Amino acid sequence: MLRGLSAAAVAAAAMLLSGCTSLPGSTASGGAATDTGNATCSGSSSGATLQLSSTSGSAASGIVAHGACSVVGVPDTATLLISVETQGPTARAATDAANGRADAVVGALRGKGIQQNDVRAGQLLVNPVISPIVAQPLAGGTTVGGTRITGYIASRLINATVRSIGSAATITSTVLDTAGDAGRVQLNYGISDDSGLRAQASAAAVHQAQEKAKVMAEAAGVSLGQLVSITEAADPPTRLSPTSPQAPVSGGVSASSVPTVTSDGQLIEVAVDVVYAVG
């Protein structure tokens, strides 16, 4: 996002925020949260690094500084991760049952006002049920064992976005009532458009890195030269839920994207590394 920014862009970013505390609220486009809450900035343990060299072939002279900022925003959407799982004596029977339950769930979601483009039916998974064969004694003291297929399990995955966050709990109950024992639901919260929050965090992170570079230059007795580069560090955002603690409803759906839960909201984190030449 911040890769390849010019020195003028960095200066403009620094003017946006003088620090990363008590950021003012802002309204992002597309229905994003209107209240960012407070933001906090923190540097890495290394903070800034001064690299001085006078011999050819070695590392270039310069100051490398790290800046990081996090902004907490209020979620405005909910996402339902729904799994419908059924079992049958044949693959066809299990599949037909899963598809029927999934179609009923989609119909219930549409009946609750969820738009068609906010409901995405996922993949169909079919797996055999493997059961052991009871060993039987034979002449000579030997036994026969092993396994055999005794049925099939089919599951359908559905992802639904709820734009009216206040109705998320009611819609979750409707889904579970419709799916019955076959249904599992994971309810997550998020921000539909976090671009405004991310821009604030980015500007503050750049400014923090600039200030660190200035301090390092003054301490080393060198002048801060031209900006060489700005690179956004790989610090991904952590999504948080407005409820705590959060547990999967009726068993839940395993997902690597399950958010960390606090009562604060969704956390947007941005980290940058800036490199300056020295005079």
Image (spheres, rainbow, N blue to C red):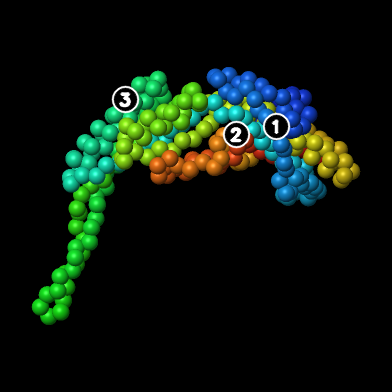
Question: Is residue 232 visible in the rendered structure shown here?
Answer: no
Q: Which residue is mark 2?
A: 265
Q: Quadrant of residue 243?
A: top right
- What percent of the width, then of the height, locates residue 153? 26, 45
Viewer-proximal residue, 110 or 59? Answer: 110
Viewer-proximal residue, 126 or 270? Answer: 126
Q: Residues within 10 Å of mark 1 (few under 14, many from 20)?
A: some
Q: Is 137 located above or below residue 238 in the figure?
A: below
Q: Which residue is mark 1?
A: 38
Q: Of tags 3 and 1, which is closer to the observer? A: 3
Q: CA distance from mark 3 to mark 1?
A: 41 Å
Check disc 1 and give the amino acid type: Asn
Name the residue: 28% across, 29% down.
103
Label 1 sits on a secondary structure element that is loop
Picture quarter with the N terminus = top right
Viewer-proximal residue, 62 or 71? Answer: 71
- What percent of the width, then of the height, locates residue 177? 34, 33
Label 3 sits on a secondary structure element that is helix
Q: Quadrant of residue 71?
A: top right
Q: Residues within 10 Å of mark 2 (few under 14, many from 20)?
A: many
Q: Is 252 located above or below residue 10 in the figure?
A: below
Q: Are dots 3 and 2 in contact, CB under 8 Å?
A: no
Label 2 sits on a secondary structure element that is loop
Name the residue: 56% across, 40% down.
244
The disc, 1 or 2, on the residue closer to the chain's N-terminal end is 1
Q: CA distance from mark 3 to mark 2?
A: 31 Å
Name the residue: 31% across, 40% down.
182
Viewer-proximal residue, 130 or 172? Answer: 172
Q: Which residue is mark 3?
A: 107
- What percent of the width, then of the height, locates residue 5? 67, 29
Check disc 3 and give the amino acid type: Gly
Name the residue: 67% across, 29% down.
37
